[in-house]
Amino acid sequence: MLVLLAGIGCSVLEWRCNMAALAAQHRVLAFDMLGHGLTDKPDKDCYRIADLARFTLGFLSAQGVDSAHLVGNSLGGRIALECARLAPARVKSLVLAAPAGVGRETALGMRLATVPLLGELITRPSRMTTRALWRPAFHDPSFPTREFIEARYALAAAPGAQQALLRTLRGFVSLAGFRRGQAAALQAALPAMKQPSLIIWGRNDRLVPADHARILEKGLPCAQVVVFDDCGHFPQVEQAQRFNEVVVGFLESID
């Protein structure tokens, strides 16, 4: 069983180029995280990393899944790591694509969005702001397309989506970067995560530095790192075929 976890402000759409290839050999589940996509967006304090990890584990329980391989991008990768910390027996392996919050550094735009009022302005749903928020995520300027932007704008404009995005972001990012205490706590917890782990990063990631992969490689006992050239923050989208091949190969190697 593979479970696909998307990043902040993302949805199952970010896995549309991967699900068929991964499902050729595995049962695959993808869902919209709490506050994202088409999932409910409660107007309350429930968007901390630990909350989202418990939501993920609860989803697995509701599906009758005792344990699974977790594949997470950006925020989804950070949630996957938190699931491994909270419930190690339920996580068979980790595939982490540019996971957020491993170190402190992140893009200025993400940091500015944590500032009250300014964040509300930066993330106010429109086609222009949607394009501005997504463009830095890709190395190839042909991403994102008009169709891509339209689909993400429709989700961003849904009732409660902007507030859920900001609450999620502000829960683990500050004006100085990913929150120091949370990054330090994660790094301290890494050696206890014994699951086979694959870290995939785009060398040209402008949102979360590819150097953070070395933190995971050093801290996780069973980790390997693959860096994609000419690739940004979404390797599963920008280099989908290679991503699928690497993940399938990794899973075959640990079976």
Image (spheres, grey):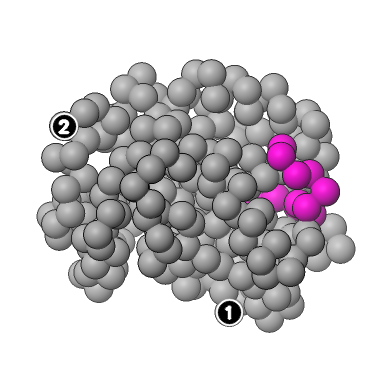
Question: Few, some or many C-alpha atoms within 10 Å of disc 2 (few <14, some 14-19, many ≥20)?
Answer: few
The N terminus lies in which quarter of the figure?
bottom right
Residue at (47% x, 62% y) in the render: 32
The C terminus lies in which quarter of the figure?
bottom right
Report how many numbered discs are placed on residues in the image. 2
Q: Position of residue 226 (x, y in %)?
A: 63, 47
The residue stretch that appears in magenta: 85-98
Element type at mark 2 = loop
119 sits to left or right of 166: left
* Position above or below: 74 against 169: below
Residue at (16% x, 48% y) in the render: 124
Between disc 2 and disc 1, whose residue precedes?
Answer: 1
- Quarter where residue 51 is shown: top right
Whether the magenta-drawn stretch holds residue 97 is answered as: yes
Q: Position of residue 213 (x, y in %)?
A: 59, 35
Extreme residue in the right direction: 255
Q: Position of residue 34 (x, y in %)?
A: 46, 55
* Res 209 visible: no
Element type at mark 1 = helix
225 sits to left or right of 237: right
- Quarter where residue 183 is shown: top right
Residue at (66% x, 54% y) in the render: 57
Residue at mark 2 to residue at mark 1: CA–CA distance:
41 Å
Which amino acid is tagged 2?
A: Leu
Question: Which residue corresponds to mark 1?
Answer: 20
**Residue 166 image label:** none
Question: Few, some or many C-alpha atoms within 10 Å of disc 1 (few <14, some 14-19, many ≥20)?
Answer: few
* Position above or below: 55 against 110: below
Question: Which residue corresponds to mark 2?
Answer: 117
- Quarter where residue 4 is shown: bottom right
Residue at (54% x, 46% y) in the render: 52
